Image (tube, rainbow, N blue to C red):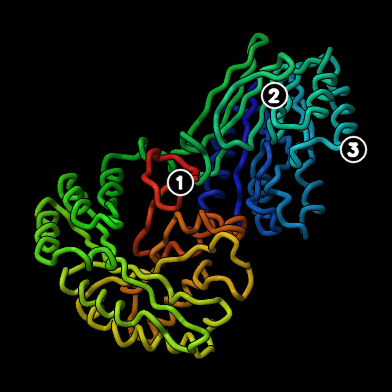
Amino acid sequence: MRLAVIADTHLPDCAESAQEASLRWALSAAAAAGADLVALAGDLTAAGEDGAAARLFSALDASALPRVITPGNADLRTPATAAALRPGLSEPGAATAGGVYVVGLDSADGAIGNAERARFQERLRQAGTAPVAVVTHWPPAEWPDDDRDWLAGVFHGTGVEVIIVGHKHLDAANAFAGIPVHLVRGLDPDKAKAAPPALSLFTRERGTWQRHDVAFPHADPRTWPAERRQEWLGLLGLSAMDRTLADTARAADLAAPCLELRADAAALADPAALRQAVGRWRAAGGRRLSLHLTNLRWDAAAGAVTGRPAWREAVRLAMDLGVDQVTVHPPRGALGDLHPDGRARECCLHACAEALPPLLDAGVTIGIENLHIARGEANDERRTFGCLPDECLGWIQALRQRLGSTGLQIGMHLDIGHARNNGPLATRWTLGRWYASVGDQVVGYHLHQVTAAGNHQPIDNPFGPF
């Protein structure tokens, strides 16, 4: 018997997401591998939204494979839909294939309620003497003591041979009540840890279980053709942050194709030394130089745009260095102040129209970079403008109209760390949803690690989730 396990797909409520692509690939790969049954181990949607659930069931219904399904905590994140969605993600809760009984256990709350205990025990009774595989979302090792004791007692004298769980987005193996437990890293390309997202195949032969993981090929650069890999590597580079001269020299030593300088730090460097360092990097093969401009701010109390002198100096520096691109945040201000018809937005557009034309005339690309909600910041009209795709795309369109620009000379510079580290907004506006929403408007990306140490840490692993 061969059991295909899909976990942690985190489907967003939008079309053309990488998450939906990985799910549809996994269902096709499971069928091609000869799976008898597919088990879905929760966190199938990013936030339990109706549109995401509809996409999930559309993909499942298009597959001819029978299934067992159980919800995860992410599926319950939207209070308005959780109660209705949970039953749909719990049926069918058990099935027999190849002589093996596969049963789902709803652990989406990180604990097991009385109703679910009764339901699970009845389904386990129906297994009779057949070998049993249990699929759940939350690892039993993290449940309350009472729930672990209950499960160990329920398993006594049954045919349970293996427990398969998701939730942690990583691969691991341990045991519970003497029964092997397999954690699977799941299918979300943005969250699978230490390895590419994968479909997990469990095969039972001669009374023993064997596991084999099949990676989602589009999310694993190691499997790409050499030309595609080289094209991707040619788009990577370094951001100098506050080490302008040292990191520009490092970029030259590494022959990094792309280099970003920050205007506030670069302005402090000796101009001749900076030009020499940039020239050395260009001679080493540097192809794309970007300058991150300073911020314009809307001062609501003063009713004026601030930061204009530094901003004009940053534009001048960009011209002097001969940059290929600049990146700049939307004007810093509150969401409620920068609405499309307000005076604040008009004043900020006017400031841009004064400073940016020389860059456009020189063929420089202007990338508008998304921001992230600050820790403790209210998620209402007072929060920072530019934290969601529609806000950034709206500002890009307003700039294009004001400056008479067409195409992608003004586009989206997607800061992946900011989108990932976006407080409560990141629950619904996942990376996958950002990519799908702004992809055809992107002119560049910021890649950086988000850890407990902060929002701009070195990347030490090509596979997520930070």
Where disc 2 sits, the SS reads strand
User: What amino acid type should be assigned to the residue bearing mark 2?
Assistant: Ile
Amino acid type of the residue that numbered disc 1 sits on in the rendered structure: Ala
Give the Cα separation between the discs numbered 3 and 2.
21 Å
Q: Amino acid at mark 3?
A: Ala
Residue 75, image x and y in percent? 70, 49
User: Which residue does the numbered mark 1 point to in the structure image?
Assistant: 453
Label placed on residue 115 = 3
Nearer to me, 97 or 5: 5
Q: Classify residue 313 as left or right of residue 222.
A: left
Mark before the other along the chain sequence, 2 or 1: 2
Mark 1 touches mark 3? (CB < 8 Å): no
Q: From the viewer's perspective, is 365 left or right of 155?
A: left
For discs 2 and 1, the disc positioned in front in the rendered view: 1
Mark 2 — residue? Answer: 163
Q: Quadrant of residue 37?
A: top right
Q: Residues within 10 Å of mark 2 (few under 14, many from 20)?
A: many
Residue 289, x across and y down, in percent = 22, 62
Which of discs 1 and 3 lies nearer the camera? The answer is 1
Sequence-wise first label, 1 or 3: 3
Res. 66 visible in picture: no
Whether tag 2 and tag 1 are in contact, CB under 8 A, the answer is no
Q: Evaluate if marks 3 and 2 touch, with contact meaning CB atoms under 8 Å apart.
A: no
Q: Is residue 299 visible?
A: yes
Res 89 label: none
Disc 1 residue crowd, few under 14, some 14–19, many 20+, Cα 10 Å: few
Residue visible at 88% across and 22% down in the picture: 125
Q: Secondary structure at mark 3?
A: helix
Residue sitting at x 53%, y 71%: 384
